[in-house]
Amino acid sequence: MLETRLLNAGYGKLQVIFNISAKIRAKSITAVLGPNGSGKSTFLRAISGFATIYSGEILYEKKNITQNPAHKRARDGIAYLPQTDNIFSNLTVIENLKIAGYLLDKDETEERIKIVFDLFPELEALMQRKAGGLSGGERQFLAIGSALIRRSKILLLDEPTAHLSQRYSREILERIVELRDRLDLTIVLVEQNVKEAVEISDDAYILVNGKIVFGGRVDEILNTTPIDRIPARYFLN
């Protein structure tokens, strides 16, 4: 569904990722792992149009989108959810969801909201609450729900469980699996909880110093290198 070929990207003159070649399969969960500062978030931002691309290509549904602006990629179905600032805190839950559907007609927006509430019933109970008053886990539910309103095809999730309780971290990861299985979504997941991320993922890439050091099917990686035997330095902050 999405492929990067020898992708070099960063911010201004600061290059962060180097020659990243990765394939994201449709209807799969791909974990992007590695220590802080390894380029995981930059990889997602490059795909979504929020980083400077120096060379290489990004192919999405067999089309070259390397030069497409971020808003065009979003309209084509690529949704990037940063770790923070991914909702309108001063608006209610329902207002956030309605704004997410601004390109849809009213009936379609209402239908999409029903789907979101079916997946995240917690949001329906909180629909009149200001988003700024939600817990960290509820905020992530709302951010993901807003992306679903826009009929996104691929979700780029940047550490969705960061700073969450163990309970909410587990629930977020369970919902991510549900999004793949029920809605056939493609998900790329940058995650700090390595073991849990690998357990729910189909594929995984490990970045160190902006370069891929492991990549491929999770079962193939674990058959050769069990997760507890992958060098600890790859995950140290």
Image (cartoon, rainbow, N blue to C red):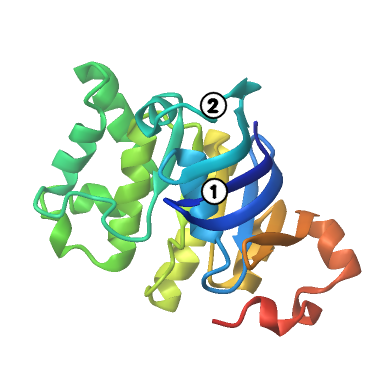
Q: Residue at x 45, y 60 (%)?
A: 172
Residue 134 x/y as whole percent: 20, 62
Looking at the picture, which amino acid does disc 1 mark?
Ala
Tell me the residue that label 2 is attached to. Answer: 65
144 vs 199: above or below: above
Distance from Cα at disc 2 to Cα at disc 1: 14 Å
Instruction: Find numbered disc 2 in the image and state the secondary structure of the residue it sits on.
Output: loop
Q: Nearer the viewer, residue 85 or 133?
A: 85
Disc assigned to residue 9: 1
23 vs 81: above or below: above
Q: Nearer the viewer, residue 40 or 216?
A: 40
Looking at the picture, which amino acid does disc 2 mark?
Ile
Q: Quadrant of the N terminus?
A: top right
Quarter of the image for residue 112 reads: top left
| Furthest residue toward front | 13
Mark 2 Cα shell of 10 Å, populated few (<14), some (14-19), many (≥20) = some
Q: Nearer the viewer, residue 215 or 117?
A: 215
Q: Looking at the image, how many numbered discs can be counted on the residues? A: 2
Mark 1 Cα shell of 10 Å, populated few (<14), some (14-19), many (≥20) = many
